[in-house]
Amino acid sequence: GNRPEISISTLDDFYLPPATVEATQEAWGLFICQNSSPTKLGKEMYNLIFEASPGILHLFTSARDVQAERLTAAIGACVMAMSEAKNLRTIVETLGFQHISFDITVEQATVFRDRIVDKIEMDLGDELTLQAHEGLVALLTYIGAGIIYVRSNYSERLKILAESWNLANAKGKADTAPSQPEEKKAPESEDGLETTKGEEDKDEGDELNGNGIHAMSLPTTFGEMFQINAAVMGLAQRNWMREVLESFDTIVRHVTNANRMQEESEVLALKISTHREENINLAEFKSCMLAALRSLLPKYWTSAHEVAWTWLWENAARMLRDQLGNPRRHQQSLERLQEGMSVEEQHELRKQFYALFFELAPAGQDY
């Protein structure tokens, strides 16, 4: 069938007739059922892509099995969201965010789309209806265009993030003394946060809401201002937020490094899991983050900053949310594996871990 050119001029909401969406979803479900595993299927699709365009091999740096499973899962998520335009657009923008460091061309995206459609055609044969074929081509075209569009059009956001983050963490170099943190909204006389002329002689030993934050302290970095806003909003006891705050500088500075962002999400999920907190609401971090940045950069802050920082956090939060349940599941799997191994086998496995670790990070031998 016809396969249109990929246009990257806009990223509008995706729409197909309900009958086409249904046919596409049924075909994808049948395609998955006919293959033994998502990992194996993803590797077969990647092999077809690499055969057609060997030059894109350097774009894929993670383990092949991991990449293969992610590919199958990502396409499946998009297929299932075809009837929900805003949800699908969010998924595609997230994929663009995760690939923002790669200079993907229209030609490469076209190869990617065509080889995947070819694989589905080969496996389903006559069971692939014309409607389903049309839907798959349209969807994969939309995904490819979206990934390229994000990189091409969100560069200004990245510039805003870099500049404002440096300003927010430059001690003594901000444009003005930091404004007071946003409150939620207790009377000034009760929370003691703002220091007026009549309060200048107030004892510096006074504390705010029992959280150890002094009224006379003037925060000059993001971390300091974040903690004050967390206290004012009643969120100071959120252990998971402290873990995110500790990793946040890395997240901001590596926003264009997809592999590093993925690794940071996995490690952060592991650290958060040690606190055994339930019902983690990632939006709480966003509220404190934006309040802290607005307070530190009152003269610089614009609606463009609001959009850029919200975009960063929502994408980072989606990556983190995907990982939050994994440590517990992984622990259960590892415990089952360990129970089935002898003491000698466990010792040998540990030796192999250390050998591989020292090979990848020789400096680790010094500790």
Image (spheres, rainbow, N blue to C red):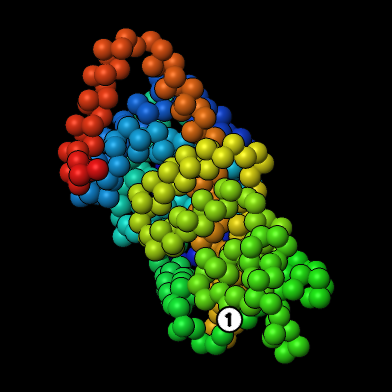
Residue 240 makes an appearance in the image: yes
Residue 166 locus on image (x, y percent): 43, 74
Tell me: 60 left or right of 219.
Answer: left
For the point 65% across and 71% down, which residue is it?
A: 205
Q: Residue at x 73, y 62 (%)?
A: 209
Determine whether, in the image, residue 17 is placed left or right of residue 159. right
Vertical comparison of 66 with 185: above or below: above
Q: What residue is shown at x 38% (from left), y 60% (from top)?
A: 254
**The C terminus - image quarter:** top left
The amino acid on which the numbered mark 1 sits, given as a three-letter code, is: Pro
Q: Which residue is mark 1?
A: 178
Q: Secondary structure at mark 1?
A: loop
Q: Position of residue 34 (x, y in %)?
A: 44, 20
In this rendering, the answer to whether 52 lies above or below 346 is: below
Number of marks in the rendered image: 1
Which quadrant of the figure has residue 218?
Answer: bottom right
Q: Is residue 174 left or right of residue 238?
A: left
Q: Quadrant of the N terminus?
A: top left
Q: Residues within 10 Å of mark 1 (few under 14, many from 20)?
A: many
Image coordinates of residue 363 in percent, x first then y, are 20, 47
Residue 17 lies, in percent from the top left, at 63, 45
For residue 291, say whether it is visible.
Answer: no
Q: Report the front residue among 185 and 19.
A: 185
The answer to which quarter of the image holds residue 356 is: top left
Residue at figure coordinates x 38%, y 46% from the top left = 263
